[in-house]
Amino acid sequence: MDVFQTLRDLSTLLIDDDEWIRDAFAMLFESEACHLKVLETAEEALAELHRNTYDLIIVDYKLPGLNGLE
């Protein structure tokens, strides 16, 4: 089964403070026609989650400020 075929039907949020990782995921998801919202901090993510819902959240554990579990 093609994982990207499944991901095309999902709304995905990525939170990572590493710009290279955010850009790499964004390019990969875009090339596979998948929806991906990328954010840099957990605080941005909390604000975003008050406005929108996501089917899948990929989060870096070690973030500045709040960590990925908080």
Image (spheres, rainbow, N blue to C red):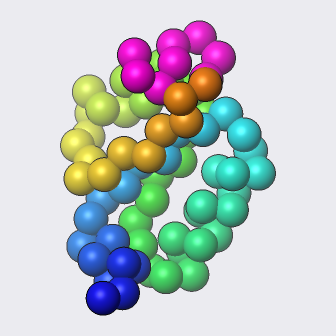
| Residue 41 coordinates in the image, percent (x, y) | 56, 26
Report the front residue among 60 and 22: 60
Relative vertical location of residue 51 with respect to residue 69 in this rendering, above or below: below
Q: Is residue 45 left or right of residue 7?
A: right
Furthest toward the top, the residue is 65
Q: Is residue 47 left or right of residue 43?
A: left
| Residue 69 coordinates in the image, percent (x, y) | 41, 22
Relative vertical location of residue 20 with respect to residue 42 in this rendering, above or below: below
What stretch of residues is rendered in magenta? 63-70
Residue at the image position 45 percent from the left and 59 percent from the top: 36
Relative vertical location of residue 30 with respect to residue 20 in this rendering, above or below: below
The majority secondary structure of the magenta stretch comes to: loop
Q: Is residue 8 visible?
A: no
Q: Is residue 55 left or right of residue 28?
A: left
Marks counted in the figure total 0
Q: Is residue 13 visible?
A: yes
Q: Is residue 40 magenta?
A: no
Furthest toward the bottom, the residue is 1
Residue at the image position 64 percent from the left and 70 percent from the top: 27
**Residue 47 lies in quadrant:** top left
**Residue 49 lies in quadrant:** top left
Q: Is residue 69 magenta?
A: yes
Quarter the C terminus occupies: top left
| Residue 16 coordinates in the image, percent (x, y) | 60, 38
Residue at the image position 41 percent from the left and 73 percent from the top: 34
Quarter the N terminus occupies: bottom left
